[in-house]
Image (cartoon, helix red, strand yellow):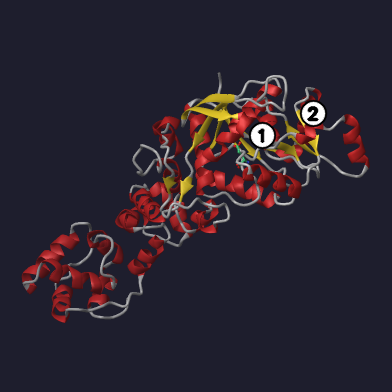
C-alpha cells in the first residue's frame, strides 16, 4: 500500500511550532515510506480564513523544507460535501435538528443535574416529515446531525458501541460512541463543520494515514463511523502528544512569538526549529540534525512519548548554537554576504562556535574590521605586546608565537595575560579564538588597538 498523508491546518492564523510538529510528523512519515504529502487547507470557516494566511502557511512549510505534493482547499470542494451529505440523508444517517443553542444548553444542564451524561437525546429524530416541513415553513433552518451507529434497531436505545483502532502513537484506542452526542456536521447557516469534510477529503484523496494531535482521538471514533457510513475503510490513525510550554500550558495558535514565522524572524535556523519540533517529547535525544532526510532516518511514530512535549526556547537557542557551530561555510556564505559579512571561510570557522543566531556574525565582523574602542586594562602588558608584535604575513601560528614572547617578557601568564589582550583587541571579555581572529584583524589595527586608539 503506498502511503498518502495530509497536514490540514485552518488558514485562520499562521502555524506555530506545535502545528509544525504535526506537519513534520506527516512529512517524515511520508519520506520514510516513499509516500505523498498533501497540504489540505481547512478553510470552511469563510469568515476567519484568509488567502494571506494560506500563503503564509505554505511559506512557513517551505522554509522548514516541506514541499507538498499537492495543495487542496476545502472551500473549493463544497459540492463533494453536499454529495456525501445527500448520501447520508438517503441512508438515514443525517437528520435535521432545530434546537437553538440556548435550548441545547438548558437540556444539557438538566441532564447533568440528574447525573446523566450530557449526550444529545435525539429529540429531533422524532420529528415527522410534516413537522420538519412545518418548521421550515416558519422560516426555521435546521442544522444537521450525524446519527452515530451506537444502537441495534432503535436509536433511542443506544448501547455501548466501542470503536477500537490501533493508533500508531498510542497503541490500541477505544471510543464509546454511546458516550458522544450525534455530531453536528452542518450548521443552520449552511457552514460545514470540520468533521465530515475531513472524512470526505480523506476518502477522495486516498489518505492512508491520518497523523494529528491527540486532541482528535474522540473525533477519530466518530470519523471512523462516518467512513463506514460512506462505504469506505478508515485510514490508519496516529495521534501524537501535544506541545506545552515550560509551565505546562498548551500553545495557542495566536502565540505570535512561537509562530514559525516568529521563530524565523528571531533568526533561528530551520534545521534547529525542525529538530526541536520533532525530537522533544520523544525517546530520541534532542540534538542537531543535518536536514529533514537525516531526521526522517531517525524518526518513527513509535518513539513519540505519551506525556506532553515541553517546548523551551532556551533549548532551541542551545540547539541553534550547535547547529551553527557545525555548519560549513558553503551552507551560510550567501546569508553572510547578505549581512555584509566578509572574511570568507576563515572568518566563518573563527566565529561559528560563538553564535546563538547567524546575524551575530555581523557583530564579530564589525570587531574584525573596526572601528573598535579598545579597553586597555594593563598598560605595561599592552606596551610589551605592541613591541613584540611580529611582522606580517600572519597565520594560525602567529598568536601562539606572539603571546609566548609576551609571556616571557612580561612574566604574566594565564588569565592575567590573555584577558587584557582580548579586551585590548576586541573590547569584549569573551568570544572566538584570537588565534583565528588575529590574522583577519591584521597588524595595523592590532597595533592601533594596543596603543589605545580606536581602529
Ligand atoms: N483542521 C484540523 C485541525 O487543525 C485538522 C485535523 C485533522 O488533521 O484531521 O485541527
Mark 2 Cα-neighbour bin, 10 Å: few <14, some 14–19, many ≥20? few
Res 342 seen here: yes
Res 69 seen here: no
Relative placement, left or right, of 126 versus 253 is right
Note whether ligand 1 is within 8 Å of mark 1: yes
Image position of 259 with respect to 20: above or below: below
Element at label 1: helix
Relative placement, left or right, of 2 versus 127 is left
Residue corresponding to mark 2: 83
- 185, 385: nearer the viewer: 185
Note whether ligand 1 is within 8 Å of mark 2: no
Q: Quadrant of residue 191?
A: top right
Horizontal and vertical percent for residue 388? Answer: 14, 71
- 8, 273: nearer the viewer: 8
What residue is shown at x 58% (from left), y 29% (from top)?
Answer: 176
Res. 198 mark: 1
Horizontal and vertical percent for residue 267? Answer: 46, 57
Q: Quadrant of residue 92?
A: top right
What residue is shown at x 76% (from left), y 32% (from top)?
Answer: 81
Amino acid at each position: 500500500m503506498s502511503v498518502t498523508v495530509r497536514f490540514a491546518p485552518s488558514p485562520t492564523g499562521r502555524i506555530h511550532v506545535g502545528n509544525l510538529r504535526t506537519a513534520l510528523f506527516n512529512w517524515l512519515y511520508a519520506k520514510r515510506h516513499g509516500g505523498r504529502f498533501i497540504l489540505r487547507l481547512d478553510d470552511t470557516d469563510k469568515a476567519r480564513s484568509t488567502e494571506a494566511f494560506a500563503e503564509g502557511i505554505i511559506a512557513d512549510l517551505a522554509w522548514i523544507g516541506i514541499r507538498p505534493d499537492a495543495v487542496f482547499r476545502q472551500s473549493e470542494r463544497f459540492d463533494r460535501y453536499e454529495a456525501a451529505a445527500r448520501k447520508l440523508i438517503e441512508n438515514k444517517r443525517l437528520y435535521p435538528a432545530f434546537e437553538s443553542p440556548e435550548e441545547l444548553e438548558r437540556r444539557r444542564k438538566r441532564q447533568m443535574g440528574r447525573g446523566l451524561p450530557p449526550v444529545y437525546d435525539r429529540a429531533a429524530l422524532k420529528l415527522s416529515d410534516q413537522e420538519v416541513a412545518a418548521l421550515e415553513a416558519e422560516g426555521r433552518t435546521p442544522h444537521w446531525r450525524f446519527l452515530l451507529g451506537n444502537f441495534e434497531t432503535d436509536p433511542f436505545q443506544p448501547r455501548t458501541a466501542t470503536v477500537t483502532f490501533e493508533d500508531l502513537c498510542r497503541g490500541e484506542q477505544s471510543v464509546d460512541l454511546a458516550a458522544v452526542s450525534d455530531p453536528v456536521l452542518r450548521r443552520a447557516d449552511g457552514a460545514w463543520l470540520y468533521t465530515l469534510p475531513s472524512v470526505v477529503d480523506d476518502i477522495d484523496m486516498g489518505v492512508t494515514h491520518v497523523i494529528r494531535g491527540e486532541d482528535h482521538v474522540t473525533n477519530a471514533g466518530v470519523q471512523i463511523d462516518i467512513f463506514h457510513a460512506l462505504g469506505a475503510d478508515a485510514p490508519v490513525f496516529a495521534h501524537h502528544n501535544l506541545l506545552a510550554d515550560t509551565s505546562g500550558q498548551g500553545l495557542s495558535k495566536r502565540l505570535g512569538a512561537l509562530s514559525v514565522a516568529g521563530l524565523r524572524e528571531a533568526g533561528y535556523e530551520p534545521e534547529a526549529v525542525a529538530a526541536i519540533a520533532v525530537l522533544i517529547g520523544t525517546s530520541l535525544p534532542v540534538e542537531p540534525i543535518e536536514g529533514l532526510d537525516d531526521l526522517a532516518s531517525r524518526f518513527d511514530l513509535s518513539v513519540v512519548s505519551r506525556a506532553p512535549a515541553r517546548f523551551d526556547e532556551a533549548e532551541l537557542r542551545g540547539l541553534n548554537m550547535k547547529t551553527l557551530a557545525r555548519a560549513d561555510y558553503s551552507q551560510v556564505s550567501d546569508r553572510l554576504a547578505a549581512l555584509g559579512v566578509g572574511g570568507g571561510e576563515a572568518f566563518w570557522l573563527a566565529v561559528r562556535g560563538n553564535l546563538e543566531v547567524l546575524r551575530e556574525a555581523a557583530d564579530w565582523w564589525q570587531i574584525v574590521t573596526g572601528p573598535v574602542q579598545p579597553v586597555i586594562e594593563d598598560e605595561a602588558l599592552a606596551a610589551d605586546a605592541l613591541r613584540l608584535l611580529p611582522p606580517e604575513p600572519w597565520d594560525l601560528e602567529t598568536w601562539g608565537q606572539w603571546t609566548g614572547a609576551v609571556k616571557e617578557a612580561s612574566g604574566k601568564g594565564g588569565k592575567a595575560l590573555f584577558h587584557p589582550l582580548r579586551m585590548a583587541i576586541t573590547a569584549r571579555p569573551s568570544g572566538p579564538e584570537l588565534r583565528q581572529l588575529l590574522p583577519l584583524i591584521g597588524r595595523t589595527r592590532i597595533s592601533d588597538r594596543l596603543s589605545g586608539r580606536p581602529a
